[in-house]
Amino acid sequence: MGLRNYLYAFTNDSMIMAFRNNAIWVISFTVSTVSIGLILAVLLDRVSYEQIAKSVIFLPMAISMVGASVIWKFIYAYRPPEVSQIGLLNAVLAFFGGQPVGWLIVKPWNNLCIIIVGVWMWTGFCMVVFSAAYKNIPRELMESARIDGASEWQIFWSVTLPLMRPTIAVVTTTVIVFVLKIFDLVYVMTNGNFDTEVIANRMYKMFQYPDFGKASTLAVILLMLITPMMVINIRRFRRQGDIGL
Amino acid sequence: MSKPVAILSRTPLHIVVVTIAIIWMLPTVGLLVTSLRPPQDVGDTGWWTIFQTPFKLTLFTLENYEAVFAQQGLGQAFLNSLLITVPATIIPILIASFAAYAFAWMGFPGRDYLFVIVVGLLVVPLQMTFLPILRVFNLLHLSGTFHGIWLAHTGYGLPLAVYLLHNFIAALPRDLLDSAAIDGASVLESFFRIVLPLSVSPIASLVIFQFLWVWNDLLVALIYLGGAPNVAPVTLTVATLVGSRGQDWELLTAAAFVSMALPLAVFFSMQRYFVRGILAGSVKG
């Protein structure tokens, strides 16, 4: 009887949908932000306008997820094919002769459309952390590899990547902790409709409903998913001895 | 490699970097441009069409901003955001700097246990705390009030602030504090005269992080303030507007830009502390 709420959490259809979507978020959001951030850190190191480009990419980190949701809902805006498109994405499609798409409605791709907003916001964070780590790699290591005839690609895989592994691990766990709790973007953009529900939004609905028993169950589930990540993260920070300030 | 060849071989790099930077900027530019266009135009054509006649200033107007301030209560919301954010930034960081100093330099029984408990709270996700706190708030009539949300943000901000400031303050040279004590400085005096001035940089980063975190917060406001317009911050007001006026892009974009203006100003004026603050704050649970 005491486990009734847990039974609900793992068997109810909308809950399973929320778990599925959180899994999609964790995988695609983490892979995208970490890999794009890493590539950008390495690429931007080679241009003279590095600081400006970094500012541009880091800027979305300053604004609220509510603001970002409005920005991107407008980009995804859909209108019937007869009238002119005011959403950037559908206008591009129309320009190439395509039919407009209801980006936030088409399942299951609408999840990815919301995830892109998150990636737009958080890639800058990953890039800045990676960039700092990248600049700490002794230049002689790369130079000597270059003299030995290694291509830039080989240097990236066999010199840069192994040396940056600890940083990549920290950033990855940090991003996962963030994304497990993702709420605002989904709440504002679709409110979990059209199969985009996530755990934190589901939990908020239980508060409104209100069903505090189920809400608590979801809170405990989130805690159990997040705590291991946080423990790994804080341990690493302690070992490295600094945290950025 | 001669110079021109080097430039030529780096062209693809520049193209990739510049393209990415433009893609990253476009969404925000679109928002800003749309918020400045007359409602009729916004509904008729895409915002990018203004680039066909970029110098035709009659295509721009401030009426959307007037409308959101006058009719959608964004002025009140902006004020509410300030009333929430300023105390919710100052209170936790003030307490945390006292605490960090005490944990680092004052001996008292159970100090290490207490410190571990405070820092351990970093791993608790926000969602875990809503229900118990809401119960207490309802008993004390704190839900729906600014006092309540200050208290909540203070609680959420403290573990991180204590942890980060402790790391910094504990690393200050012992001689400095010892010699101050020999000169007869009290604990408070050495805190205000020595520790605080030396900690300006980490405190500045923390202030920026906490300020942005609270300013941009939606969930904590939803839970503890509810939707009442007299206390709702800008994030909540804009989120409500998305629900009620979902197709009126001239209003939504103007409202969203109002909510973003202060964070953007902080970003552009204090970028160094901003980046440090965000990096440090990323450990928050």
Image (tube, coloured by chain):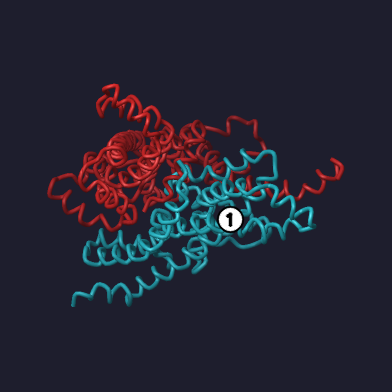
Please identify the quadrant where the C terminus of chain B is shown.
bottom left
Q: Amino acid at mark 1?
A: Met
Q: Position of residue A38 (x, y in %)?
A: 60, 54
Residue under the point 43% across and 49% down: B282
Q: Secondary structure at mark 1?
A: helix
Residue ranking furthest to the left: B139
Judging by the rendered image, the residue that carries numbered circle 1 is A164
Is B118 left or right of A141, judged from the image as shown?
left
How many dots with numbers?
A: 1
Q: Position of residue A201 (x, y in %)?
A: 35, 60
Residue B127, placed above or below residue A136: below
Residue placed most toward the observer, B199 or B79: B199
Report which colour depicts chain B. red
Q: Position of residue B207 (x, y in %)?
A: 38, 36
Q: Position of residue B144 (x, y in %)?
A: 22, 44
Is A123 left or right of B95, judged from the image as shown?
right
Can residue B45 be seen in this snapshot? no
| Mark 1, other Cα within 10 Å: few <14 / some 14–19 / many ≥20 | some
Which chain's residue wears label 1? A
Residue under the point 27% across and 73% down: A6
Which image quadrant is residue A180 in? bottom left
Residue placed most toward the observer, A61 or B259: A61
Can residue B62 be seen in this snapshot? yes
Residue placed most toward the observer, A64 or B170: B170
Q: Judging from the image, what is the letter of the chain drawn in cyan?
A: A
Residue under the point 40% across and 54% down: A234
